Image (spheres, rainbow, N blue to C red):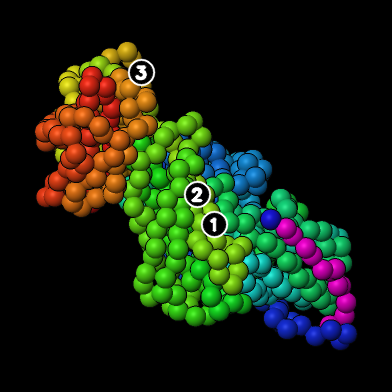
């Protein structure tokens, strides 16, 4: 990320006329900063209130959602929406709970969240504070326009300010905030699970924590400022979507006391004829066996329609190739599911994707980290303490095929339930709890036989909460002969029909099992045979066990 600025010109309007800012006195515009997180039960209610306020005042209210604090700290596999700027903003707001919001970072008597000095307010007070602010005259107007190169990510921001009156303080501070809209991610509240749409998400403060100092603040002063900023491919590993970026600018009297502001959606500029971009790799949850099929967002940021792309992808260093064919117009995008592949876990788990050469290769690759799911042993111990609405609570545990392995609920009010879940099948499981009203309340603790915690909540989970884990997955593979495993090769994999084998020299016994360890097919390959017919088998991941002359190995196969 690079930031270049041109000098600030503080000159009389007669010497240089304004182009995007009004010189007539205007009322203040509102910057509504909402403090939020991804594990916040009531934050979606705050988002809805803020959106409604903006809808009532579409040209005068601008929202900045700041992910900070404990509700924003991600668990493994969840996105990190925090920024380096959030903590200081939380501290000066003096908030005491989430969601909280400030309106122009002003103090409103009787609306303070802590009842005394905080500028943070509860969500039911944001509208009143907004209306009070919109009724006030502002002594400075702001205008902003911006362009964004779709290929290079170079963002040019042009800001103008005009003082229709004099500031009561000698120094003001110009702030430029970069936001991203429409980011899909988890949210405890709102009933959307991992598919909540996060809007107005602060990703960077281009002018620093509290803006750039402006030292001439008298009536008639005109300020013209241009910033050049290189948009990175991601923020904290969360992919940047250029079409979803938004700018909010504002002038403040200090780190607090915003005078007024404005906003702009960058105009996308297309510079090349043939330019495909890896816009994103879809988030990958916890993975508990070594097979993965990544999904990417393929974007056409060139002027010509794209019909094909050569895609290379690596999973922990193992490389695979895929050819995409389709019809993608200029500035269009599509999700592409790449074929699932077997891979080794190696501690640092990364998927990297690259597309073939085109007119601009600077946007042709992207990578994402993923996590290996924890594995547990023995029967599972489940403890549930319901609230006054136990009839709203249910749970289920699915195996990797989506089949329900165990489930429970609804229950009575203020009831304690203890249950042992007998584990006899090795698999990858997802344990999910639900609250039909969407506001949680029931406490849940799931542990394995050794007391290791798998899932725990004190009731603050909103509509749903889930955890993926493995149950002795590695034992499926047994004790292999490493040299035999290296000698044997299978292809094609994935397959829809026959599996061809090489490296077999004598009669070989084979067993095809699903990931649960259940036998699906058995047989033998006589000398000279090299194929197994799996036509008609249900698509999924299977284990092929081969035994030849007391040598043993297991290969994973994928049926499409």
User: In this view of the protein, can residue 169 be seen by the observer?
Assistant: no
Q: Position of residue 148 (x, y in %)?
A: 62, 71
User: In this view of the protein, can residue 213 be seen by the observer?
Assistant: yes
Residue at 47% x, 67% y: name it: 299
Q: Which residue range is magenta in the image?
A: 2-13
Residue at label 2? 352
Label disc, if present, on residue 452 of the rendered structure:
3
Q: Nearer the viewer, mark 2 or mark 3?
A: 2
SS for callout 1: strand
Q: Quadrant of the N terminus?
A: bottom right
Q: Position of residue 522 (x, y in %)?
A: 11, 33
Image side of residue 7 versus residue 492, left or right: right
Query: Looking at the image, which is closer to me, 534 or 6?
Result: 534
Image side of residue 187 versus residue 98, left or right: left
Residue 63 occupies quadrant: bottom right
Mark toward the start of the polypeptide (2 vs 1): 2
Q: Position of residue 270 (x, y in %)?
A: 58, 77
Residue 18 occupies quadrant: bottom right
Is residue 4 shown in magenta?
A: yes
Q: Residues within 10 Å of mark 2 (few under 14, many from 20)?
A: some
SS for callout 3: loop
Residue at label 1? 365
Residue at 72% x, 58% y: name it: 2
Query: Looking at the image, which is closer to me, 237 or 436?
Result: 237
Mark toward the start of the polypeptide (1 vs 3): 1
Is residue 140 shown in magenta?
A: no
């Amino acid at each position: 990320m690079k930031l270049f600025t041109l000098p600030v010109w503080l000159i009389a309007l007669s010497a240089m006329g304004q182009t995007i800012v009004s010189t007539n006195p205007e009322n203040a515009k509102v910057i509504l900063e909402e403090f939020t997180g991804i594990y916040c039960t009531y934050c979606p209610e705050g988002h809805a209130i803020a959106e409604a306020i903006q809808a009532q005042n579409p040209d005068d209210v601008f929202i900045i959602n700041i992910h900070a604090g404990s509700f924003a700290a991600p668990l493994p596999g969840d996105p990190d929406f925090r920024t380096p700027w959030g903590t200081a903003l939380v501290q000066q707001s003096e908030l005491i709970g989430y969601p909280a919001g400030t309106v122009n970072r002003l103090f409103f008597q009787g609306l303070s969240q802590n009842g005394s000095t905080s500028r943070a307010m509860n969500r039911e007070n944001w509208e009143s504070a907004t209306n009070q602010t919109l009724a006030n005259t502002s002594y400075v107007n702001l205008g902003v326009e911006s362009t964004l190169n779709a290929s290079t990510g170079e963002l040019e921001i042009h800001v103008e300010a005009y003082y229709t009156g004099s500031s009561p303080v000698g120094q003001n501070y110009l702030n430029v905030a970069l936001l991203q809209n429409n980011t899909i991610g988890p949210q405890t509240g709102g009933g959307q699970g991992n598919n909540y749409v996060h809007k107005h998400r602060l990703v960077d403060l281009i002018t620093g924590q509290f803006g750039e100092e402006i030292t001439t603040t008298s009536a008639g002063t005109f300020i013209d400022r241009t910033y050049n900023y290189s948009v990175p491919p991601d923020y904290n590993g969360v992919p940047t979507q250029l079409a979803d970026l938004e700018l909010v600018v504002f002038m403040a009297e200090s780190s607090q006391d915003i005078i007024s502001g404005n906003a702009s959606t960058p105009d996308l500029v297309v510079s090349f004829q043939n330019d495909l971009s890896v816009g994103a790799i879809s988030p990958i949850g916890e993975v508990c066996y070594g097979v993965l099929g990544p999904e990417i967002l393929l974007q056409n940021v060139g002027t010509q329609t794209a019909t094909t792309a050569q895609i290379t992808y690596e999973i922990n260093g193992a490389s695979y190739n895929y050819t995409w064919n389709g019809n993608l117009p200029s500035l269009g995008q599509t999700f592409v599911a790449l074929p699932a592949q077997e891979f080794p876990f190696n501690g640092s788990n990364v998927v990297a994707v690259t597309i073939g050469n085109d007119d601009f290769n600077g946007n042709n690759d992207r990578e994402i980290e993923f996590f290996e799911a924890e594995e547990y042993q023995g029967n599972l111990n489940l403890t549930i303490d319901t609230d006054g609405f136990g009839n709203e609570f249910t749970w289920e545990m699915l195996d990797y095929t989506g089949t329900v392995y165990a489930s429970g609920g609804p229950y009575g009010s203020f009831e304690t339930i203890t249950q042992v879940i007998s584990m006899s099948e090795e698999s990858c499981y997802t344990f999910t709890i639900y609250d039909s009203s969407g506001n949680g309340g029931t406490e849940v603790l799931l542990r394995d036989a050794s007391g290791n915690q798998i899932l725990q909540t004190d009731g603050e989970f909103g509509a749903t909460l889930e955890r993926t884990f493995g149950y002795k997955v590695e034992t499926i593979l047994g004790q292999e002969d490493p040299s035999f495993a290296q000698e044997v090769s299978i292809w094609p994999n994935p397959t829809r029909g026959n599996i061809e084998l090489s490296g077999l020299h004598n009669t070989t016994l084979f067993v095809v099992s699903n990931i649960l360890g259940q036998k699906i097919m058995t047989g033998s390959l006589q000398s000279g045979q090299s194929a197994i017919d799996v036509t008609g088998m249900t698509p999924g991941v299977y284990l092929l066990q081969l035994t030849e002359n007391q040598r043993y190995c297991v290969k994973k196969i994928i049926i499409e």
